[in-house]
Image (spheres, helix red, strand yellow):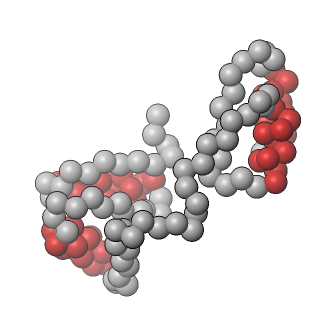
Amino acid sequence: FEEPIEQILSCIPRERKTYLFSATMTTKVAKLQKASLKDPVKVEVSNKFQTPKTLIQQYLFIPSKWKDCYLAYVLNECNGQSIIIFAATCNNALRVTLLLRNLNFNAVCLHGQLS
């Protein structure tokens, strides 16, 4: 993605505020930061190896035709707790959100194609 960024930087004013967000700080991203930012401020959320001691992580192997039923069952068992569900695609995320809302769960869909 280096070339498109260079094209964008050549078209915008030199005096500007630029925000660069990256989930990973690779050498390419660091190089891009040095080339395009003046006096950058680095903000890190946390160390990627730290997991809160109160976080409960679980996984289940479920036949795909029963995933929706098991999901509803697990959510009922965890009533009152905050849960994050990861979906493989944007369409799946929307489908699961609609399913959960129809089952009277409070569900919010977040994916990369939201505007």
Where is residue 89? Give x, y as percent.
47, 59
Q: Is residue 79 visible?
A: yes
Q: Is residue 72 visible?
A: no
Residue 95, placed above or below residue 76: above
Residue 26 on image: x %, y %:
76, 55
Q: Residue at x 85, y 24 (%)?
A: 10
Would you say 77 lies left or right of 60 here? left
Say left or right for 26 vs 94: right
The image quadrant that residue 21 belongs to is top right
Residue at 35% of width from left, 82% of height from top? 60
Is residue 88 toward the left or the right of residue 18 in the image?
left
Q: Is residue 23 above or below residue 61?
A: above
Does 21 sit above or below residue 18? below
- Measuring from the top left, give residue 106's x and y in whole percent: 21, 51
- Could you tell me which quadrant the N terminus lies in? top right
In percent of width and height, residue 97 lies at 29, 54
